Image: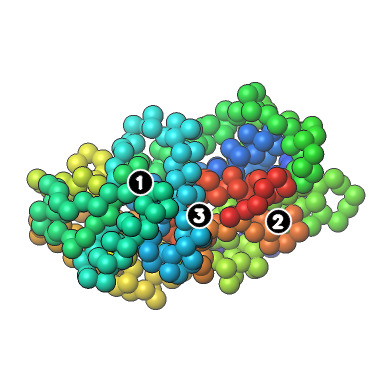
Amino acid sequence: MTVSLWQRMDSSRGVTQAGTEADIVIVGGGLCGLGAALACEEAGVDWQLLEQTRIGWGASGRNAGFLIRGAAENFARACRDMGRDSAKSLWKLTEANIARLESYGLTELSSFERRPSVVLAYTEEEAKELRDSARMLREDGFDVDVPSSGTDSLWRKYPPLAALANPGDAVVNPIELVSMLAERARAGTRAGNRTGARVGTGDGGAGTGAGVGKERIHEGVEVHAIDPVTDSSDARVEVRARDRILRARKVLVCTNAWGPLLLDELRDRVSPRRGQMLALRADGESLDAAYYSNFGSEYFRPGPDGLLVFGGRRLADEAGEVGYEDKTTPVVQEAIEEFARRIVGPSFEVVARWAGTMGFSPTGLPMTVEVRPNVWFCGGFTGHGMSMAVETAHQAVSSMLGSGAGH
């Protein structure tokens, strides 16, 4: 959305509000922003988080709820495209992401299910890549299965030529996951985890501690500018929103696809792509795993209350799926339904349709980058923020604190 002159002028009255300075201001309240908030909390750094609408209202609450190892493409193809070392690091990052979420209470969520993610091949080309992937993953120390049969609707009606399973993966209601992370961030963890790191010093000096006992997650706050501070204040960056101005030593933008609308420097680094999904009810049909097929362009899994979730098929209108517009389209929805018929047959009821905007990076790798002095961006998850965002956000905060390199 754009911000009018009058709305920009209105932000000036927020300068005198209490709590308008922080060590780190986080922009964006999805999985990445909440992961960054928790990383700041664990480091004893004072933080404030600004979310334009509601927590988890973007792609973090609109995805299919997959927690997978790796990316949509198989490991052999990823090694070819980005190099084996980078692919291996990405696979390890996604394993670490799941492990970190488990440490936060993932497995206690009512919607959590340990479900293997299974990559399916329906062409000889992809089948060979899956066989190569299994071999290479084992060589690199990853646990992997190669199923050849099953009893659910997929295996009965549309059996693949080959399959590769990641046994440690899971599915979850993403809104429940986001809500849990927000509750944990609001509650704070400093009593047992404070390190006292001061932003940008790396010296272990005393933190401000100003975040304890006050609300630090602010919803309905749309940021429209991030500028350097020009006076003698200890703050280095000014974050301007519609009704307030916050000052911070550093800013971390965690808006993923929406980053280029706030930071021009990201226009060639992150591109918005829409993903569409639907949920259906098909009597007598079931799925036992979270599935990907056609190099990740289709995905489907069991959902709540006997529903099945299907998504993808962007290739049905690839050009039309670039951009920020939040809507479903007949061409892609019909393509998803056509694919679903292969799995569950012709008789089903669609109970929900939705879309979400993802941020794609040119390399397929998530990024942590300082785009201007003291202003960082974390994003570019290329459709896999559920599996990458929280761990990448921790790496981003580590980089900002000067105690480690970003991914």
**277 relative to 212, above or below:** below
Asked if residue 120 lies left or right of residue 368, the reply is: left
Element marked by disc 2: strand
**Whether residue 299 can be seen here:** no
Q: Earlier in the sequence, mark 1 or mark 2?
A: 1
Residue 178, position in %: x, y? 46, 41
Kindly check if marks 3 and 2 are in contact, taking CB atoms under 8 A apart as contact.
no
Residue 204, position in %: x, y? 77, 35
Q: Residue at x 73, y 47 (%)?
A: 402
Q: Name the residue beneath numbered marker 2.
A: 375
Q: Name the residue beneath numbered marker 1.
A: 143
Between the C-alphas of marks 3 and 1, the distance is 15 Å
Number of the front mark, 3 or 2: 3
Q: Earlier in the sequence, mark 3 or mark 1?
A: 3
Q: Name the residue beneath numbered marker 3.
A: 89
Residue 20, position in %: x, y? 74, 41
